[in-house]
Image (cartoon, grey):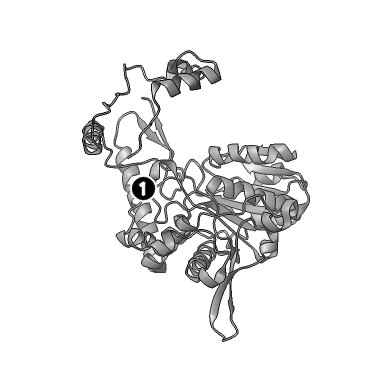
Amino acid sequence: MTYYPHCQKEIDEMLSVIGLNNIEELKKPIPEKYILKKDFQFKNIESSKTELEVHNYFKGLSEKNREYISVFLGAGAYNHYIPSAIDEIVSRQEFYTAYTPYQPEIAQGTLQAIFEYQTYITELTGLDVSNASLYDGATALAESVLMSIKASGKNKVLVDKYIHPEYLYVLYTYLAPINIEIKIYNSDPFIFNINDFKKQWQNDYASFIVQSPNFCGTIYDLNEIGDIIHNDKSLFIYNVTEPLSFAVLKSPGEYDADIACGEAQSFGIPLSFGGPYLGFIACKKDFLRRMPGRIVGQTTDTDGKIVYILTLSAREQHIRRDNATSNICSNHSLCALRASVYFSLLGKKGIRTCALKNMENAHYLQNNIKKLDNFNLIDDQIFFNEFSVKTEI
């Protein structure tokens, strides 16, 4: 049970230190329109209450909350069904309590699970190598852009306007301190105009970052982009917030992307009030040594048995310090394990079936929204599982 054990004396001491008179003054930085208008007071629980009594009290309060049967949050946060076997396997103590696999002789299970995760990601993206996961889709994109800057030696990037806006905020946070210029490509949210892109592209860009399906849900035709970018020795970065789409659409590798990155939350990971999630990066083997985070490799021991190890560790900050490829040294290996179990349970056929079901349900929803008053849809929008709706309400 979560509780706040601060007595009034401790609260008064805290307020004195920060120079406030009461708890209400803590709300001053929040705009008035965002402050709850209803009269609400925290309940002071009598000290004589037992833990069971307190638990039952708060359980009674919680039952007054409204529970949402369906969640349509989207934009990299998807409420997909999670097979029960995932929780059963991941909650085993050898996975749930394991952390850093730097001692391979006692971490073979963890290392193998990460290796299999990397294999699944490369199969899904059509690229050569994957790392052992990152914190979330936003940091995965930012690290991908840093890879492109180091690989190209250029200090400017072009970003499509309709990537996830929160990813763009993180990108500004990453790149501003190192004076990397971000240019926004003002594309059409519902169709990618290759001729317009040719006019906007410049040879001093380190990379072009595009998301498909984009934030509006549109699937872009990216067939000619790779040649244009590669002619200037720059990198093509393919971002995605729902990689399940790769089960039915062309993979980044088929578009000749250099790096694929994004959010893999929908692969067996619950919404969990916003995290932890699972960022992924895959790339061509040419950029393997510039990839951030951990990479697990497979080899054989002196008896010829297959074993797993952390490889290319000299890239990491604990060894190379300021010469490391990235400040990210950790990974979300428990979330990556969930994704691995999800992939193994569904298999290639099951993943494709799941993706087709997403498309079917999304188009069913769109057709029914068409029948409603005050709602208009974008004509001929090509989408996977999210689409745009205009409303007069």
Residue 162, position as x, y percentages in the image: 55, 40
Say if 103 sits above or below 364 in the image.
below
Q: Nearer the viewer, residue 260 or 200?
A: 260
Q: Nearer the viewer, residue 294 or 186?
A: 294
Picture quarter containing residue 372? top left
Q: Quadrant of the N terminus?
A: top left
Is 3 on the left-hand or right-hand side of 247? left
Say if 244 sits above or below 285 in the image.
above
- The answer to whether residue 175 is visible is yes
Q: Quadrant of the C terminus?
A: top left
Tell me which amino acid carries mark 1: Asn
Residue 390, position as x, y percentages in the image: 41, 32
Residue that mark 1 sits on? 79
Residue 349, position as x, y percentages in the image: 38, 68
- The residue located at (52%, 60%) in the rendering is 250
Picture quarter containing residue 350? bottom left
- The answer to whether residue 180 is visible is no
Query: In what element is the residue under mark 1?
Result: loop
Say if 295 sits above or below 166 in the image.
below
